[in-house]
Image (cartoon, rainbow, N blue to C red):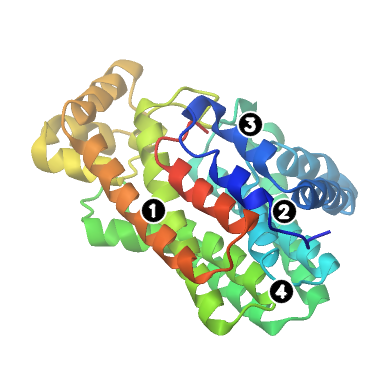
Amino acid sequence: MFGGRGSQAASSRSIAGQSVNQSAQTLQSALPPHTVEAAREVEDLLAGVARRAPETLVAPALEAVTAGGKRLRPLLVLLTSGMGEPDEQAVLLASTAVEVLHTATLIHDDIVDRAESRRGRPTTVAAYGRDVAVATGDYLFAEAFADLAEIGDPRLIRSFAEASEGLAAGELEQYRAAGAEVDVEVYLEHIRMKTAGLFKAACVAGGSLGGLSLRQIDALANYGQALGIAFQMSDDVMDLVGEPGVTGKGVGSDLAEGTVTLPVIFALNEGDAGLINRVLSTPEPGPDLLESGIDAVLATGAVEKTEAWARGEVETALEDLKLLPDGPERAILEYVAAEVVGRNS
């Protein structure tokens, strides 16, 4: 299922440069058939994880794992493993584990943030209450490591454990820093832990299962981290300029929660810092105040600076991919990196 490359490489490269609105559909259409088949199997395995939950958690777990999204993290496992000769079942389990772990962190994030909706649907905590949401997230977290234990590769367990530790530490630091002054280095450390770590773990898992060399796995780790950083920076921009339902949350939600993102840091240094700080320090700011805060950020060059930084991270990611085997998987990884900046979902 994961073998076979060659003639598709050129067609995979040709997808770059299409409109952002077409990017998700283009990505799906460019995937090698064996990757599409594997992605469908991962969807079935995700539903199976939810249905194995204790009875009271089946419904919230199933809603959480089937809530949509690009499935970028499991796709990274599938693509990076496809550069070698992996065990198919192990790859499916690792792909499932990374998405289950990601879903668990989203549930816990929504609990901490008291979020009401995600991707236009009620969050687990809003629909089922805090106790059920905590139990659902904990169950999914445990199931992710159960899948990894079944694979039996200590490198994967170590990689995912490090990512999980970073996720927890990053969320705690972000919560403590809400509304406080944050500099660029502190912000970068937050997103390395909270977002980039799981991208890195997915790439390391795929490279390891594919039997790639240590040098190539290191290159994939660097690619995953750079991609994750660029992804989060793009997400920070979309929080200010995106559309509700497309971004997965309300516009300006980071600002409303007191979360200091990179464009906000830039705007504080060159714009109406007094107004922006008032929004950051106000619990549940009203629509007018929030809109004024967003306008204050957009009146500066903060978005453009953030996008430029993200493009720099993407260039780093693309450079690391040069050490990987040429073929459709590498071409699609290049496309994914190039499309992160300016994405619409």
Type of amino acid under label 1? Val
Q: CA distance from mark 3 to mark 4?
A: 28 Å
Disc 3, disc 4: CB below 8 Å?
no
Mark 1 nearby-residue class (10 Å; few <14, some 14–19, many ≥20):
many
Q: Are marks 1 and 3 in contact (CB under 8 Å)?
A: no
Q: Residue at x 55, y 43 (%)?
A: 110
Mark 1 → mark 2, Cα distance in angstroms: 37 Å
- For label 4, the residue is 209
Marks 4 and 1 close (CB-CB < 8 Å): no
Distance between the Cα atoms at labels 4 and 1? Answer: 25 Å
Identity of the amino acid at label 3? Gln
Q: Alpha-carbon distance for marks 3 and 2?
A: 35 Å
From the image, tell me which residue sits under label 2.
135
Label 3 or label 2, whichever comes before in sequence order: 3
Camera-side residue of 84 and 4: 4
Give the vertical position of 107 relative to 322 (above or below).
Answer: above
The residue labelled by disc 1 is: 314
Residue 1, given in percent of the width and then of the height, sits at 84, 59
Instruction: Identify the amino acid type marked 4.
Output: Leu
Q: Is residue 133 left or right of residue 34?
A: left
How many marks on residues?
4
